[in-house]
Amino acid sequence: MKNNEFSLFTSSLKRAKQTAEIIGEKLDIQPRITDALKERSLGKANGKPVQWLKENIENEEITIYDKCFNDAESRYDVWQRLVPFYNEIISNDDQNIIIVSHGDTLSIFNAMWLGLEAEILNRIDLYGVSGGVSFLHQTSTGKRIIKRLSDTSYIKSW
């Protein structure tokens, strides 16, 4: 029996797709893969250790328009990449939407969800942590709420 109560969207990057496949199996739904949910490209730093990035960074990122490397994406570039996806999901009739993505991308999405302008990300962050689950809700009157942000309480400590 097909589950019509949930829609599942995922980044096209490996770790997000693997997570979405597990969720999809449990809920009997097929993940919809989209590049819109990919993590921000760090250009020549992609795939390199964080230490390498810190030692070789070309430009300090102060605003959402700054890029750490000339071939990287800025946070504003990610905002622009997310806009069509965001407009698609808020205009559909799906009751529950599950999004599997990455920390910085989700931070940007969370600001969109609250109806904030991109420039607010120069002063605030609504960051997602690895394994974190957020619950975003829209009331029948259209009010948008973040009930939980990047919650990891489901992870048991050993």
Image (cartoon, helix red, strand yellow):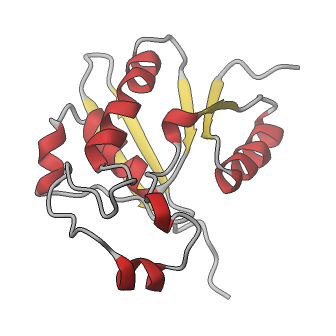
Give the image quarter of residue 77. top left
Spot occupied by residue 76 in the image (x, y as percentages of width and height): 26, 42
Q: Is residue 132 left or right of residue 63?
A: right
Q: Residue at x 71, y 52 (%)?
A: 14
The C terminus sits in image quarter: bottom right
Q: Is residue 114 left or right of residue 5?
A: left
Give the image quarter of residue 119. top left
Spot occupied by residue 152 in the image (x, y as percentages of width and height): 51, 66
Q: Is residue 84 left or right of residue 111?
A: right
Give the image quarter of residue 34. top right
Spot occupied by residue 69 in the image (x, y as percentages of width and height): 34, 62
**Location of residue 157 with respect to 59 vertically, above or below:** below
Q: Residue at x 78, y 43 (%)?
A: 21
Q: Residue at x 39, y 32 (%)?
A: 82
Image mark count: 0
Along the viewing direction, whichever of 40 and 144 lies nearer the viewer? 40
Q: Residue at x 83, y 19 (%)?
A: 2
The N terminus sits in image quarter: top right
Along the viewing direction, whichever of 92 and 144 lies nearer the viewer? 92
Spot occupied by residue 35 in the image (x, y as percentages of width and height): 56, 35
Q: Is residue 146 left or right of residue 92?
A: left
Most distant residue in the right direction: 1
Along the viewing direction, whichever of 5 and 101 lies nearer the viewer? 101
**Location of residue 43 with respect to 83 vertically, above or below:** below
